[in-house]
Image (cartoon, helix red, strand yellow):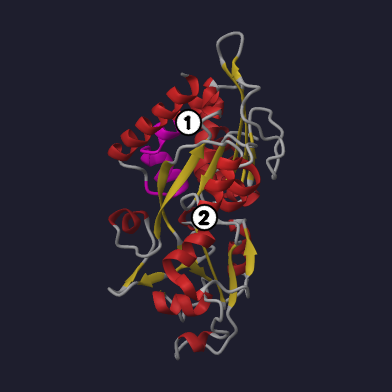
Amino acid sequence: MASSHDADATGITRRKSLAALAGAGALGLAGCTQSSDGSDGGDGSDGGDGSDGELSGPINIAGSSTVFPLMSAVMEDFAAQHPGVDPDISSTGSGGGFSNFFCTGDTDFNNASRPIQPEEEELCAENGVEYVELVAATDALTVVVNPDADWIDSLTTEELAQIWESDPAQTWDEVRDEFPNEEIERFGAADTSGTYDYFIESTLGERGHTSDYQATEQDNTIAQGVSGSEYAIGYFGFAYYFQNPDQLKALGIDDGDGPVEPSLETASSGEYTPLSRPLFTYPSIESLGEEHIAEFARYFVEQTTDEDLVAGDVGYVPATEETQEEQMSILEDAIEQAQG
């Protein structure tokens, strides 16, 4: 895979490259074998310092499709600096990553668009997997419709719940009288996704989530579905909309004080409620015992305040300097525990 820096020569911007990555759902760099299921995962025990002192070895990462573009961008830069590092990043959903790979000891990091859940904590404990939680960025979970849907610009949180609850509205005019009498087509995150979990927590609560929708872990599948029908609706992390603003129409969300459109500014200020959320990555403490993995973890935290990368290239709100310092302190303690 060509780096995005080289891709500029062919007219492909880094932002478009990341959009393609988000759709592909897997990243292989530096000659590694690319996989979508993390089957080549490991705890980094084959890595470490090369004989010449260069960093080398595999780094295996699974989890959130929302965090995937950010992790991929950071890894691309790190791998360019350290050709001996062999990364494999898969988009499996937060829950799919925890349950199937990370908490069974098969990956070094798990990306997540919501905090680790109690049942996942138990699974990690059963398998002796210790970890730390690191804040990566802030996202504005974005609700999108077809660009031709000129009859809608915003939804209240109650209307949003009516569309997505377990017993949902079937036609748009059931949501609002002036909407068309047309069937609602829904595209959204699969139940292995942290975005799915967060959407329920922030918007639906005990009303549950409908099963009457096209569920996927791939943001481009949601985008394609919504762009293909004037009466479709979908939701995913802001980064994909940010990278493809002409394909979709983002809706303002009215949480009681009038509609607020998703943006880096409204997510950062706290105006975009209730769909602003922190994003995370979880490194395994055992994996941090490998120097190349520890160095990558440090590099990742360092990059979380990079506005050009996090906001400009990917489309998330960067961490503050204070948050970065707190996360680095947490990480250094974990590295000391792993290597001490």
Q: In terms of depth relative to the viewer, which is nearer, 135 or 102?
A: 102
Residue 334 image point, x, y percent: 44, 29
Q: In terms of depth relative to the viewer, which is nearer, 213 or 46?
A: 46
| Label annotation for residue 297 | 1
Does the CB distance between marks 1 and 2 fall below 8 Å? no
Q: Main secondary structure of the magenta part?
A: helix
Alpha carbon separation for disc pair 1 and 2: 24 Å
Q: Residue at x 64, y 41 (%)?
A: 104
For this view, does 176 lie left or right of residue 169? Answer: left
Q: Residue 21: in sight, yes or no?
A: no
Q: Quadrant of residue 146?
A: bottom right
Residue 55 image point, x, y percent: 56, 18
Q: Residue at x 36, y 41 (%)?
A: 307
Three-letter code for the amino acid on which mark 1 is drawn = Ala
Between disc 1 and disc 2, whose residue precedes?
2
Q: In terms of depth relative to the viewer, which is nearer, 12 or 41?
A: 41
Residue 211 image point, x, y percent: 62, 73
Q: Residue 139: in sight, yes or no?
A: yes
Three-letter code for the amino acid on which mark 2 is drawn = Tyr
Label 1, secondary structure: give it: helix
| In the rendered image, the vertical position of residue 256 relative to residue 134, given as above or below | below
Name the residue beneath numbered marker 2.
240
Q: Is residue 307 magenta?
A: yes
| In the rendered image, the vertical position of residue 31 relative to residue 174, given as above or below | above
Q: Which residues lie in the magenta part? A: 299-317
